[in-house]
Image: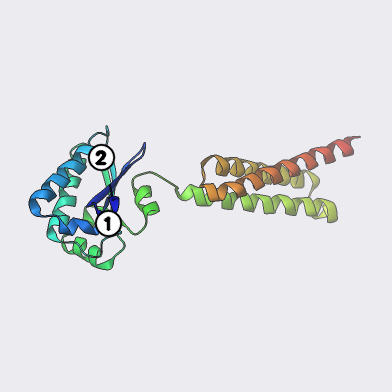
Amino acid sequence: MDTTSLPFQYETTDRCSIICLTPHLAEVNWGDLEQVGTEIIQRVQQKPEPNVLVDLSQLSYMGSSQVALVVRLWKAIKSRNGKMAVQVTHPLVRDVLRIAGLNSLWDITETRVDALRSLGIGPTRRSTIMPIVGVVGLVVAIAGLCIALLNPSLLPPQTLQILRYVAAGVTLFAGVWTVARARRSTRVLGGGMIGAAALLITFQILEQIRVLR
């Protein structure tokens, strides 16, 4: 079957359903549109608590029948304590929803990432903050190492030692978190932070052993 000619496309994951309405929906008559709505709702209601992303990014126009379809879906989701987010990219579609007053009822976003985030799925702010924290910790740890090698009298030895361990520890923690929970494109950075932190900690331990001898 040619899915490009269907009025909607349906995707499902463990955490949400994604309903993508296509421009062919405008060609469906009112009676058939009711059946389309029933089919979508039946699929969504198979989830215990339906979380639904309605993707309108393919639409450049949205008529009243299409709006009514999404409203019907939203009511079905709301009745089962689910959540709904709407992805809109075209300004005319956004204006239609705004004029209908639906922008105050729905989470309307421009990207799928933001829509998923509004459903509590996907990367959060921590996904950005933690790698930054790790990089800052790495910079501080390297700075501490440079001070210890080049100008150790700049800071008291014990303070410098604590600073280096804490900074390396922060880097190690942020690296592990990034590898485990951040986006795939950021995990390489997390692995680098883990390796760098391990080297810095190992170097400092060996340095202390040498001093004690």
> Which kind of residue does numbered mark 1 sit on?
Leu
Q: Is residue 82 left or right of residue 124?
A: left
- Determine the secondary structure under disc 2: loop
Q: Nearer the viewer, residue 6 or 63?
A: 6
**Sooner in the amino-acid sequence: mark 1 or mark 2:** 1
Q: Nearer the viewer, residue 92 or 98?
A: 92
Residue at x 71% of width, y 46% of height = 196
Q: Nearer the viewer, residue 209 or 9?
A: 9
Furthest residue toward front: 1
- Determine the secondary structure under disc 1: loop
Q: Is residue 149 left or right of residue 81?
A: right
Residue at x 28% of width, y 50% of height = 2
Residue at x 71% of width, y 49% of height = 141
Q: Is residue 79 left or right of residue 193?
A: left
Residue at numbered disc 2: 82
Give the colour scheme of this rendering.
rainbow
Furthest residue toward top: 48
Residue at numbered disc 1: 56
Which label sits on residue 159? none
